[in-house]
Amino acid sequence: MDIRNCSRCGRIYVYDGFNICIKCRQEDEEDFQKVKKYLAEHPGANIMEVAEGTGVDSKKIINFLKEGRLEIADDSNIILTCERCGKSIRTGRFCNQCVLDLEKELKGAVRDSGLKQQNYKAKERIRIIDRRNRDK
Ligand SMILES: [Zn+2]
Ligand SMILES: [Zn+2]
């Protein structure tokens, strides 16, 4: 059993592949559901509007983007680039190929230093994606 401290709240938890504990993840999940609901009612809302409408911190919404749970809307002309190879992407921080390459080394590592919000701006319109239907 791998016991670690949650990188957000500092509580001790049994490590299961995530850097934060189950409680913090549940919190994230609740916030994600709020964002999802808001976007269903307000398609094409931008990050700022979603943050105001849901009370969810815009940093957290950006995190959802980085986690690939949200993506920039189709008709948005802002194109993100892979932080590793520079290829154009619409969600997350890396292109699919780099994700595969980096998956193992990123897992469990402390990330996000110095790269915060580099690719996402408050005006970017976002939408929910469902990875389960898209990949594989
Ligand atoms: Zn926690
Ligand atoms: Zn790449």
Image (tube, rainbow, N blue to C red):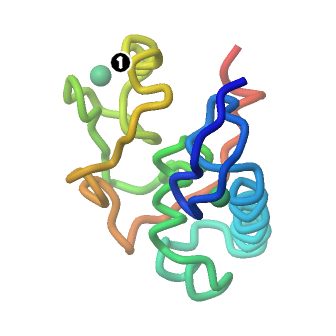
Instruction: Pinpoint residue 72: horizontal percent, then vertical percent.
Output: 48, 52
The residue nearer to you, when weighing 3 against 70, is: 3
Q: Quadrant of the C terminus?
A: top right
Counting every numbered tag in the picture gives: 1
Query: What residue sits right under mark 1 in the picture?
Result: 98
Quadrant of the drawing holding the N terminus: top right
Q: Quadrant of ligand 2?
A: top left
Q: Residue at x 64, y 85 (%)?
A: 55
The x and y percentages for residue 105 are 39, 18
In the depicted view, which residue is nearer to us: 115 or 39? 115
Classify 61 as above or below 25: below
Q: Secondary structure at mark 1?
A: helix
Q: Amino acid at mark 1?
A: Cys
Is 19 displayed left or right of 76 in the figure? right
Residue name at image x 66 percent, y 67 percent: 43
Q: How many other residues sit within 10 Å of disc 1, few (<14), some (14-19) or many (≥20)?
A: some
Q: Is residue 133 left or right of residue 20?
A: right
Any atom of ligand 2 within 8 Å of the CB at mark 1?
yes
Name above or below for residue 82 compared with residue 60: above
Left or right: where 127 falls relative to 75: right
Residue 54, image x, y percentages = 68, 82
